[in-house]
Image (tube, coloured by chain):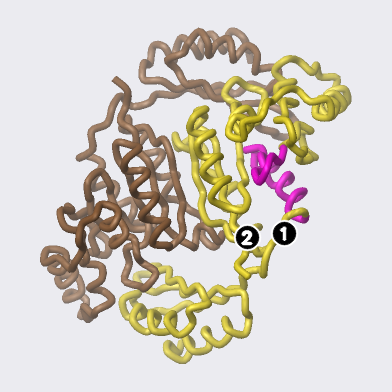
Chain colours: A brown, B yellow
Amino acid sequence: MPNPTAAMLVIGDEILSGRTRDSNMYHLAGELTRVGIDLAEVRVVSDDADAITGAVRALSDGFDMVFTSGGIGPTHDDITAENVARAFGVPISVRDDARALLAAHYARSGTELNESRLRMARIPDGATLIDNPISAAPGFTLGNVHVMAGVPTIFEAMLASILPTLVGGAPLLSQSLQIFRGEGDIAGPLSELAARYPDLGIGCYPFQRDGAFGAQVVIRGQDGGRVDAAIAELNAMFPA
Amino acid sequence: MPNPTAAMLVIGDEILSGRTRDSNMYHLAGELTRVGIDLAEVRVVSDDADAITGAVRALSDGFDMVFTSGGIGPTHDDITAENVARAFGVPISVRDDARALLAAHYARSGTELNESRLRMARIPDGATLIDNPISAAPGFTLGNVHVMAGVPTIFEAMLASILPTLVGGAPLLSQSLQIFRGEGDIAGPLSELAARYPDLGIGCYPFQRDGAFGAQVVIRGQDGGRVDAAIAELNAMFPA
């Protein structure tokens, strides 16, 4: 049975302007691979209502599950929650359970739960909260879309709390071999190997190091025995 | 006049599996901002023919220009060129000028220009070559789509060679202020500031450092005087 598929939606002008270097995509990709969920597409869009709504609809329809990152803070440019609600055609308002989480958190530090902070308690109808152990303001799951914070520590904590609830497939196993030959010398034999192992993913990633050309060949699959067999054949073709 | 818009398409299983951390997106975002082109969307798709063709069509239709990264090497999983051709409905074949570039390059190192390497001379009908000063195999521009390599040094060199040919708008200027207050305290006044400066982009990026909460407020716009005025107002609201 094929693995479930996932997409990610990164929301934020700061990524698209080059101000911030995204790290949530890299983190999510590694975690999903580990639990056997195939990350099939990532989109990055700006803090724009139509861009967010359109991408949520397209990815929610196209993949088994969607993870979003960014745009759920207290400021005017945090517009993810209302646009996920809009994508699903459901109302959004401050919800008592989310408000209670924020009230308890800010009471501990003697901070006022003002109108801006209360924005973070707006949850679309029918959504389930995602725990935020760091700064209390929750994420949420609506349909097959998991809405999480953009700050990497919070994104990672939220993901850790929902990962055990997701049904994955067989984890993707991989082995790799470094070959100090030009990629053009490797390509022909590698293509024949790929044809003999259609169940495996075989990638070739060139590098240049100390003036020498080489490539890292990565073989991925769900059946460890098949991955072993393919890497052994590759080793025999290109002895170190 | 609004700036021209751009989208990026990153092609490669290695990004989606978490094996490789993308750096081309971050580089492109910074370079485009510098020359006044707005990067409005990024998509990352796998080495899959339909995914590539679909994304090229959608982004080429939706934005003024598109930059792709990855999938133009000599191996079986390098399928970007033929799928960009497919997206535009034009034939692709080995072209004499591209073949000559490769032949000269490999002759210098005494390397055989074999069938796999010759794959890198396949250019869609009507495309213009993009110079590759590092490893010769060219990228190409077809319609409004610029097709470039995934290896960061080569991607950056190819981008450097086409950037002067692109017509940008006014570069985006930005100033930022670090405010050591919770984002929830900043949000209200910031929202009012944003309403008074609808021509500027005002973003708020929270951080936590040495146990203290704060946020970096970034104000962006094409008119330096307006950016100065807004940052002065912000300074007055939140004196250091």
Element under label 2?
A: loop
Residue with the mark numbered 1: B167
The chain ID associated with circle 1 is B
The amino acid pointed to by label 2 is Pro
Residue found farthest to the front = B89
**Quadrant in the rendering for residue B76:** top right
* Quarter the N terminus of chain B occupies: bottom right
Frontmost residue, A231 versus A11: A11
Q: Earlier in the sequence, mark 2 or mark 1?
A: 2
Q: Is residue B134 above or below residue B1?
A: above
Residue type marked 1: Val
- Left of A6 or right of it: where is A194? right
Residue B71 visible in rendering: no
Query: Residue B4 bears which disc, if any?
Result: 2
Left or right relative to A160: residue B206: right
Callout 1 secondary element: loop
Q: Is there one chain holding both mark 2 and mark 1? A: yes
In the displayed structure, would residue B9 be above or below residue B94?
A: below
Residue contact at pointers 2 and 1, CB within 8 angstroms:
yes
Q: Position of residue A156 (x, y in %)?
A: 33, 51
- Which chain is indicated by disc 2? B
Point 62% across, 65% down: residue: B3
- Per the image, is A130 magenta? no
Front residue (pair A203, B116): B116
Q: Residue at 84% across / 29% down in the picture?
A: B97
Please report the residue visible at 62 percent of the width from the left and 11 percent of the height from the top: A189
Q: Position of residue A214 (x, y in %)?
A: 67, 26
| Stretch in magenta | B140-164
